[in-house]
């Protein structure tokens, strides 16, 4: 007899349960729902973030800064929590910049990247005194003019669109024709312009892609990014102080995916620090991580309104859906729809008994949170939890679509 092994989700062992109920930082989900005042809600577990940061800190060699890419989850309370625990915060809009400043991150530790920064956004960054990761000659020219007009010194790094592509990354953001960064071959001319304009040059930024679960491919990406930046550094107006190698560390979302083994990636970075410092004494490397730091710490919890059989298939109709969690519905950049890890949060000790689909209250077939998943028998009033929801959940969802109430977010 041949058996085909169906791929399974990675165990969601960052959480525990008691009495059959999922705990988020020690608090049962039903109690959290009462704290939230209503379902659905997002809850982010501080202890899970803390553990992730601790593991990473223990592995990263000296000379590598750890930055938080706020785009993954810009909840202000979470930004405050991260502020004292990371070396830098990378923002991607003027709105995120304000959240970082409010959170108490020193402007010297904030960098601002993103294509198409408006003149207003550039002025805000200049006024705040943060590092601007310039993505075009227009940004440089505008910044120089604003700096002249105001007398405020500009701090710039150049975001480079590399001349290679990252293998095996979930989402490519560098290499080939891209709207992000300055094509590597155009960087020397831009550096001469930065020098002629007298702007304060601090370093480089490369961001080649996101959601990579393969250590070898990350090591390869970091090695190639560094050698590109060291080559470009010879044309810089002064020795760069910071080389931001991006990140792209992924987390397991789908059946068959396993957690990234970060130890070899961090070990390889030790060699890269040595290599960089041979030509550039004292230079620092930086990693900017979003989902890897916060994604596994978050859950989205909704409540079943109705158990609805239709022609032999059971739909659990929940009070939450794609308007709150676009990514879990499969509509946030996924090519093939696959299920996020999901459970019945008040029946964690019951084995799966039936294959059901969890849908939301929106009048569209896109509003599907889990398709034909094995779950313990459940019905009205039970809690559905979607794991891996701490990044690109609340802020990456069309919250106004169909006019349902927005979910509460809690840092627990
Ligand atoms: C989106 C983004 C990140 C964060 O990506 P994750 O996959 O969440 O780690 C980091 N840096 C830049 C420039 C980004 O655009």
Image (spheres, rainbow, N blue to C red):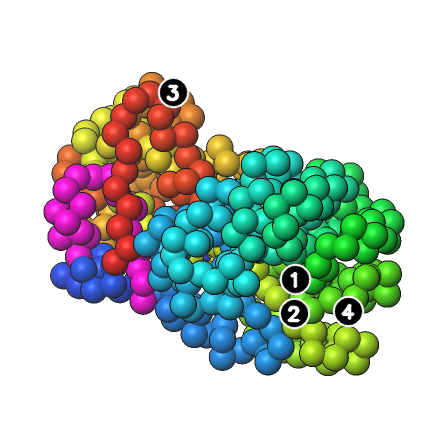
Q: Is residue 22 visible?
A: yes
Please say if the residues under marks 4 and 3 sit with CB atoms less than 8 Å apart: no
The residues tagged by marks 1 and 3 sit, at their Cα atoms, a distance apart of 42 Å
Which residue is label 4 attached to? 239
Q: Viewed as shown, does residue 155 lie left or right of 234?
A: left
- The residue carrying pointer 4 sits among few (fewer than 14), some (14 to 19) or many (20 or more) residues within 10 Å by Cα, namely some
- The residue at the point 57 percent across, 60 percent down is 288
Nearest-to-viewer mark from 1 and 4:
4
Q: Is residue 189 above or below residue 305?
A: below
Which residue is label 1 attached to? 244
Name which of mark 2 and mark 4 comes first in the sequence: 4
The residues tagged by marks 1 and 4 sit, at their Cα atoms, a distance apart of 14 Å
Q: Is residue 268 above or below residue 232?
A: below
- The residue carrying pointer 2 sits among few (fewer than 14), some (14 to 19) or many (20 or more) residues within 10 Å by Cα, namely many
Q: Is residue 29 magenta?
A: yes
Rendered image: mark on residue 399: none
Query: Which segment is the magenta one?
Result: 28-47
Q: Position of residue 50 (x, y in %)?
A: 37, 69
Name which of mark 3 and mark 2 comes first in the sequence: 2
Q: Viewed as shown, does residue 55 lie left or right of 313?
A: right
The residues tagged by marks 3 and 2 sit, at their Cα atoms, a distance apart of 46 Å
- The residue at the point 70 percent across, 74 percent down is 283
Nearest-to-viewer mark from 1 and 3:
1
Name which of mark 2 and mark 1 comes first in the sequence: 1
Find out if the beta carbon at label 3 lies less than 8 Å from the nearest ligand 1 atom: no
Q: Is residue 14 visible?
A: no
Which residue is label 3 attached to? 364
Please say if the residues under marks 3 and 2 sit with CB atoms less than 8 Å apart: no
**Residue 339 found in image quarter:** top left
């Amino acid at each position: 007899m041949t058996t085909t092994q169906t791929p399974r989700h990675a165990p969601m062992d960052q959480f525990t349960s008691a009495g059959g109920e999922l705990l988020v930082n020690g608090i049962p989900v039903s109690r959290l729902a009462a704290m939230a005042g209503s379902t659905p809600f997002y809850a982010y577990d501080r202890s899970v973030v803390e553990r992730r940061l601790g593991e990473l800190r223990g592995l990263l060699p000296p000379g590598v800064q750890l930055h938080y890419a706020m785009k993954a989850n810009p909840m202000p309370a979470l930004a405050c929590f991260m502020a004292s625990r990371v070396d830098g915060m990378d923002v991607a809009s003027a709105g995120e910049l304000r959240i970082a400043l409010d959170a108490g991150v020193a402007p010297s530790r904030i960098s601002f990247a993103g294509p198409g920064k408006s003149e207003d956004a550039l002025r805000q960054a200049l006024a705040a005194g943060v590092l601007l990761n310039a993505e075009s000659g227009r940004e440089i020219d505008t910044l120089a003019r604003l700096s002249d007009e105001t007398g405020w010194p500009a701090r710039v790094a150049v975001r480079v669109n590399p001349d290679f592509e990252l293998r095996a990354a979930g989402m490519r953001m560098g290499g080939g024709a891209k709207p992000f960064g300055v094509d590597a071959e155009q960087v020397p001319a831009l550096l001469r312009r930065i020098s002629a304009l007298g702007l304060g040059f601090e370093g480089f930024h490369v961001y080649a892609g996101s959601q990579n679960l393969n250590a070898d491919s990350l090591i390869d990406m970091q090695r190639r990014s560094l050698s590109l930046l060291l080559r470009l550094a010879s044309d810089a107006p002064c020795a760069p102080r910071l080389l931001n190698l991006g990140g792209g560390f992924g987390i397991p979302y789908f059946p068959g995916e396993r957690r990234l083994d970060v130890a070899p990636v961090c070990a390889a970075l030790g060699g890269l620090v040595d290599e960089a410092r041979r030509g550039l004494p004292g230079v620092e490397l930086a990693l900017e991580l979003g989902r890897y730091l916060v994604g596994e710490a978050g859950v989205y919890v909704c409540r079943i309104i109705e158990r609805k059989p239709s022609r032999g298939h059971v739909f659990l109709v929940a009070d939450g859906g794609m308007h709150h969690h676009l990514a879990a519905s499969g509509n946030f950049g996924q090519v093939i729809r696959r299920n996020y890890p999901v459970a019945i949060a008040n029946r964690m000790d019951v084995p799966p008994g039936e294959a059901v689909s969890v849908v939301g209250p929106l009048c569209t077939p896109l509003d599907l949170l889990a398709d034909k998943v094995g779950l313990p028998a459940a019905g009205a009033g039970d809690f559905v939890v979607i794991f891996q929801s701490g990044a690109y959940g609340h802020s990456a969802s069309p919250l106004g679509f169909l006019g349902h109430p927005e979910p509460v977010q809690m840092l627990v």
